[in-house]
Each structure stands twice: as structure tokens, then as C-alpha cells.
Image (cartoon, helix red, strand yellow):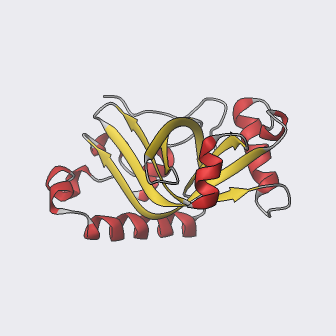
Amino acid sequence: MAPISGSDKFSSMLETAAETAELQELLDRTYERASPQYRLIVTPARRLSAAQVVRLLQGKRFIAFATTTGDGAPRAMPLDALFLHGRFHWTTDAAAARIAHLQRDPRCSATWFEGDELMVTVHGRAQLIEVGHPDYEELESTWERESGSRPSSWGSHVYHGRVEPTHMYAFAQHPENFLDS
């Protein structure tokens, strides 16, 4: 399988060296705490490094984003996302059920995958970002570069969201296709 490249429209990585190092620490810490079953499948040779994850997730990607209802029922829905500064970022309208779920309980999970070849999964807490947040304008302009319009123009109240990770898993059947440069 040939390495997957990011979107032609969005080609610059925004992660700093410190953010990439923090991401690597998270990946390492998560792997050390992973179940024996996971480590049987995702051997050290099949892990992706933070630098590989950052390059792999360039441009708009589609993730399965999971929340829970008030009675604990799981809900997963597809969302478009950007991986910026070592975090998945997404947008959604205030009327979406996931907003009510996250306002009640911010715990969430997101997974991006390409068949059984590549996978990045994150578990953590969602942070909802609105006008006035220090990161709002950067997110608006980054989404505009990627998709051609600002999320704030997509509806009367569109949230930006970010998953602040507690766990992150990154797997490739053939990580040698994504060698660090």
C-alpha cells in the first residue's frame, strides 16, 4: 500500500516540536497501559510514531465520533475532522444531539481508519469552542483553508470541538510505509 498523503489544499503541518513530543509521550503512555489483547495485535513494529500520525492525518479526514446518551447508550456518528496541534478538531451544529450529550458528559472517543491497514483512535474529553475562545479564530481560518468556507457560516450556531486525549492508539499494518523523515 502506498503512503497516504493529505489533502492537496492543506499541506502544512501546524504541530510544533513540543506538541509532537507531547503526542509521542501520550502514544507511549497509552501503549504501556494497553490490554494484553491490544498489544498482541499491535506489536511495537506496528505502532505509528507521533511524527507519522501528524503526517498521516494531514487535511480533512472523516472520523467515527462517539458520545453517550443520558442513560449511557453509546452513539457514534461520522464527522469531518482536522488533526491540528496533535488533537482531533471537528465542527457541528448546536442542534446536534452530540452537543447535548457532551454538555452533560464530555467524555468521547474518535477513530479514523483506512480499512484494516491504518487506525488512529483517541479517548478523552471534548472541549466545545465558541466565539471568544482564544483558539476560535485559528480554527475558523484553518477550516476555511481546508473546506472553502468558515464553519460559522454553516448555521446559526456552529460549535468547534476538540478532543483532549487521555489515550491515543495508532496502528499500521505496514508502518514502514510511513517512515519518519
Q: Furthest-front residue in view? A: 71
**For residue 31, above or below residue 142:** below
Which residue shows up at 64% across the image and 51% down it?
100
Instruction: Give the image location of residue 17, x and y in percent.
Output: 56, 66
Which residue shows up at 77% across the image and 53% down it?
138
User: How many numbered badges does the structure rendering display?
Assistant: 0
**Could you tell me if residue 46 is visible in this image?**
yes
Instruction: Give the image location of residue 37, x and y in percent.
Output: 15, 56
Instruction: Please state, as top left, top right, bottom left or bottom right, where the N terminus lies in the image.
Output: top left
Describe residue 37's horizontal placement relative to residue 20 as left or right.
Answer: left
**Could you tell me if residue 181 is visible in this image?**
no
Q: Residue 104 sits in which quadrant?
A: bottom right
**For residue 34, above or below residue 66:** below
**For residue 57, above or below residue 107:** above
Describe residue 100's horizontal placement relative to residue 62 as left or right.
Answer: right
Foreground residue, 96 or 39?
A: 96
Foreground residue, 77 or 131?
A: 77
Foreground residue, 156 or 129?
A: 156
Instruction: Give the image location of residue 128, x and y in percent.
Output: 68, 57
Foreground residue, 86 or 163?
A: 163
Instruction: Give the image location of residue 82, x and y in percent.
Output: 60, 44
Which residue shows up at 44% across the image and 50% down it?
53
Q: Residue 132 sits in which quadrant?
A: bottom right
**For residue 125, above or below residue 9:** below
Which residue shows up at 35% across the image and 29% down it?
2
Describe residue 17's horizontal placement relative to residue 154 as left or right.
Answer: left
